[in-house]
Image: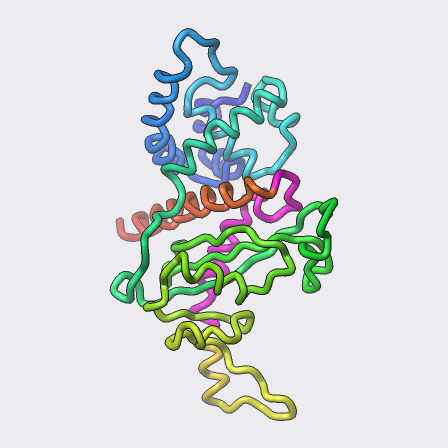
Amino acid sequence: MLTYEKLSRKPGTFRRLTGVSVGVFSEMAGKNGPLWEKRRNNYEKGGRNHALPGVENHLPAMLIYYRCYVTYEFMGFFFDCDETTAMRAVKRIEKMAIRVIRIEKKRGISASDTEYLIPDATEQPVQRPKRKQRKSYSGKKKGHTQKTQYITDPAGRIRAVSRTYPGKTHDFTIYKKQKKRDRFCGVPKKADNGYQGIRKYDKNAEIPYKKPRGGELTAEQKDFNRRLSKKRIRVGNTIREIKIFKIMSDTYRNRRKNHNLRANIIAGMVNMKITERELRKAA
């Protein structure tokens, strides 16, 4: 049976299998520990023991599932239990993790909190739905997808995660729907051409200049686009870190209603990884 004790002896293997370092895992376990004890005291008095004992073994199950996105049958073989037990273990720890690992929720972010914000949306393939297929069909990806918008700060830290939308939904439509909930209007935005029209809502937003039909961009406009692109690299790097977890990049096989919960948990883990890197550099 695979256990945290065995995995933690090989930090490199631990990182490759779970997507996080032993240090980040320890922080996650510390945050989930009190919730686990509370649950055990309230619901498990006199009951049978879990096949995966303790939060320190539930968390690796969730992380390996997110990182590798294998079937629950494979997970059961990995952890020496049946697939139903593996599925329940993942769902059990997800309900706790979303409370303590997700990104910090603020009523709003002002210009004093961050210099600017960078929105970007990413698509993920999904299995062809039985109904309303046109709604999820993405002409850009030539297939059925779902879309999530992430907003990061200049350090790449995720400040907001949108709901999960069908792949046909335009990036700017997602931004408009999320704008009222996220309340970031006072902070400058660095957007791409998928956000044409953003200045009607945020006057201090910046988007690249588009090449006019039959014309050319000026040297100043090209320079502006290059500088904007360099600043937007941060959100691209963050989305790449999100997609290290294959549950966010491979064809999504689970119920769509659970996708946003997992996107928020993974966003919180990515922020923890960024904080760990910053502390390592400062040391």
Q: Is residue 53 above or below residue 34?
A: above
Q: Is residue 79 above or below residue 167?
A: above
Q: Residue at x 43, y 70 (%)?
A: 190
State the image coordinates of residue 202 (x, y, percent, origin top left): 40, 73
State the image coordinates of residue 280 (x, y, percent, origin top left): 32, 48
Answer with left or right where residue 145 lies relative to residue 241. right
Answer with left or right where residue 122 lies relative to residue 23. right
Q: Residue at x 31, y 60 (%)?
A: 109
Pick the front one: 220 or 112: 112
Q: Is residue 230 above or below residue 70?
A: below
Q: Quadrant of the N terminus?
A: top right
Pick the front one: 8 or 144: 144
Q: How is the image coloured?
A: rainbow
Total numbered badges shown on the rendered structure: 0
- State yes or no: residue 200 in magenta: no
State the image coordinates of residue 55 (x, y, percent, origin top left): 41, 24
The part of the chain drawn in magenta is 229-255
Which residue is at the far top? 46
State the image coordinates of residue 126 (x, y, percent, origin top left): 67, 48
Answer with left or right where residue 231 lies relative to residue 110. right
Q: Residue at x 50, y 78 (%)?
A: 208
Pick the front one: 278 or 141: 141
Q: Residue at x 66, y 25 (%)?
A: 73
